[in-house]
Amino acid sequence: MDSAAAAPPRTGRIRVGTSGWRYGSWRGDFYPRGLPQRRELAFIGESFSTVELNGSFYSLQHPDSYRKWRASVPEGFTFAVKGSRYITHMLRLRNSRTALANFFASGVLALDDALGPVLWQLPERQEFDPDRLSEFLAMLPRTTAEAQALARDHDARLDGRDWLHIDADRPIRYALEPRAESFAHPDLYALLRDHRVALALADTAGRWPRLEADTTDFAYIRLHGSAELYTSGYSAAELREWSDLCRRLSNRQADHPADVYVYFDNDAKGHAPHDARALADLVGDAPEGAP
């Protein structure tokens, strides 16, 4: 038999983590009792290969925070960064160039090689407007050098607290999480393919539509709870189903393996880190540096 024909199919990297890490209910449960709060992210880095940074959604963070976060995790760890809600929920993607410059100037680029996908979560009441979305997606910098150039156009609010350095020019990945039924449209999928943006697959206990489409070379999954939004845990059978899906997504293109990023957001009762650890074990995602 030809050796090339016998070779197993290549698969992308499956990374599993949580959305955020600073939750009081995790202390003394997932986090060991007595673990200092300043050590919680380091514990995440010892437990998972990725985390979704969600403080960036609520406000512009400080470069010192990004630098501290990067220093807290091992080499090879990845941060997904949630895009600013000022852009998505207040501006509704309109006239957002300066706000986008502020976002990238706030310290995102200080993550260096630990910068993973940037997620744009849209509000529930935002309907699909292909022209508005296309204009926004075309504005997104595709590399860290492009982001650096854009960040230089930040406004006065970032004067004296900007971060405009990069250690290398790397590609930047983006994912979009819509929450209105009108986004279930072929024109959306075509638009995302044109701009190489992933359509986030969100499990939301039926609250928002579950949209699925292969639009770029990676997949982004957010698990908010299957039965009760943000609250319910996932059963062993459900986690096996998600494991199977992750594996299918990671080898959906034999010649171009797809990376898969999965984040548990069912944190209200502390299920997220335990579910994430169980799914990571199922897909073989060991934390960086683990034997």
Image (tube, rainbow, N blue to C red):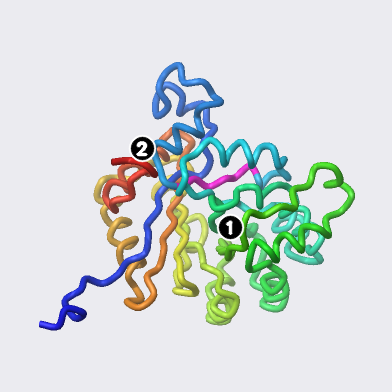
Snapshot quadrant of residue 254: bottom left
Q: In the image, residue 120 lies at what x, y percent?
A: 62, 59
Instruction: Give whichever of discs 2 and 1 has the lower sequence position.
Output: 1
Tell me what residue is drawn at x 72 percent, y 40 percent: 62
Which range is magenta?
A: 50-55
Q: Secondary structure at mark 1?
A: strand
Position of residue 289 relative to residue 215, above or below, is above
Image quadrant containing the C terminus: top left
Residue nearer the viewer, 76 or 238: 76
Position of residue 195 relative to residue 13, above or below, is below
* Magenta segment main secondary structure: strand
What residue type is disc 1 on?
Leu
Q: Secondary structure at mark 2?
A: helix
Image quadrant containing the N terminus: bottom left
Q: Are marks 2 and 1 in contact (CB under 8 Å)?
A: no
Is residue 35 in view from this perspective? yes
Q: Residue furthest left?
A: 1
Tell me what residue is drawn at x 48 percent, y 67 percent: 211
Q: In the image, residue 245 lies at what x, y percent?
A: 32, 62
Query: Local crowd at mark 2 within 10 Å, few (<14), some, or many (≥20)?
Result: some
What residue type is disc 2 on?
His
To which residue does mark 1 refer? Answer: 119
Q: In the image, residue 71 lies at what x, y percent?
A: 56, 38
How far apart are labels 2 and 1 at the CA level? 23 Å
Left or right: 100 as drawn, with respect to 243 = right
Tell me what residue is drawn at x 55 percent, y 58 percent: 117
Residue nearer the viewer, 266 or 159: 159
Find residue 274 and name its label.
Answer: 2
